Image (cartoon, rainbow, N blue to C red):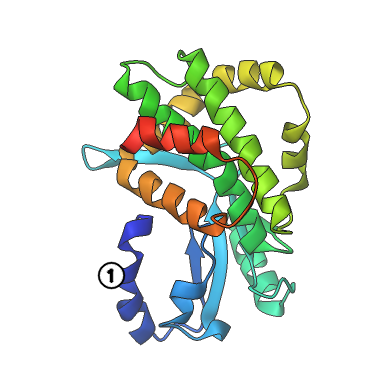
Amino acid sequence: MQRQQVSQILPILKENISPIIIFTGNNPSGAAEYLNCIEKSRILLGFGGPGGYREDHKIIAAYVDDAILYVGELDGKKSDRLKNIEHVFTNSGIKVDISEDIDAWLKTHMAFISPLAMGSEAAKKQNKTLGTDIEIAKLALQGFRENVKALKELSIPILPKKFKLLTWIPLSIIRKKLVKLINSEFGRIALSGHANAAKYEMKRLSEDFFEVVKDVKTDMSSNQKLYKLSFA
């Protein structure tokens, strides 16, 4: 399901008897909407590492090494049930990364993905790709840095911590690596392919992120420009 479809499935999940429901996917908004329908004790947040899209009733997906499931409790504790989940998935060949603050992890991830998704759509409108439109790629990276500053202003941890490196490495270096990644087979499927196949989800997710940071003093002009170029 995509972000804008969540409200349709929550009443169904409410009636499900499973004691644990893991919500995986891009989500900068946290668990508030889920908690309106489902008990807190049943909810885990997570994210599935592979990316891709549907085509002719098939799933086209890209993986980096082992498939990875990021997951965490709402309170950040490494509970027994998380350890059990880790055991089950690991034995199935899927690596599990338990987050100490899954909400912050998801917000940071969206801080990176949102400008890339908007940039991909903006480049597409110019009959280009994010890997060939250098100016849009620059704008997307500036948008990411704005987003990280906004999260810091809100005292939201930047997770995983390696994302902090992207806030001080020169944009020219990051841009070259980003363009190389986007132009790779993995990037074509998991990044631009996924974003292009989920245009309306990416629009909703960008709006969700804007809602999270709406009261910050950080300059968000690059993101605002990207949004207009992409969805206006």
The answer to whether residue 144 of the structure is visible from this angle is yes
Q: How crowded is mark 1: few (under 14 residues within 10 Å), some or many (20 or more)?
A: few
Q: Is 171 placed above or below 118 here? A: above
Res. 15 image quadrant: bottom left
Residue occupying image coordinates x 31% and y 80%: 11
Query: Dividing the image into 4 quarters, which one contains the N terminus?
Result: bottom left
Q: In what element is the residue under mark 1? A: helix
Left or right of 166: which side holds 71? Answer: left
Residue in the image at 48% along x and 66% along y: 23
| Residue placed most toward the observer, 165 or 186 | 165
Horizontal and vertical percent for residue 219?
61, 40
Look at 67% across and 22% down and name the residue there: 174
Q: Nearer the viewer, residue 225 or 69?
A: 225
- Residue 190 seen from this side: no
119 relative position to 78: left or right: left
User: Residue, x 22% and y 43% (percent of image)?
Assistant: 57
> Considering only vertical position in the picture, is 220 above or below 100?
above
Which quadrant of the rendered structure holds the C terminus?
top left
Callout 1, which amino acid?
A: Gln
Reply above or below: 218 against 140. Answer: below
On the image, numbered disc 1 is attached to which residue? 8
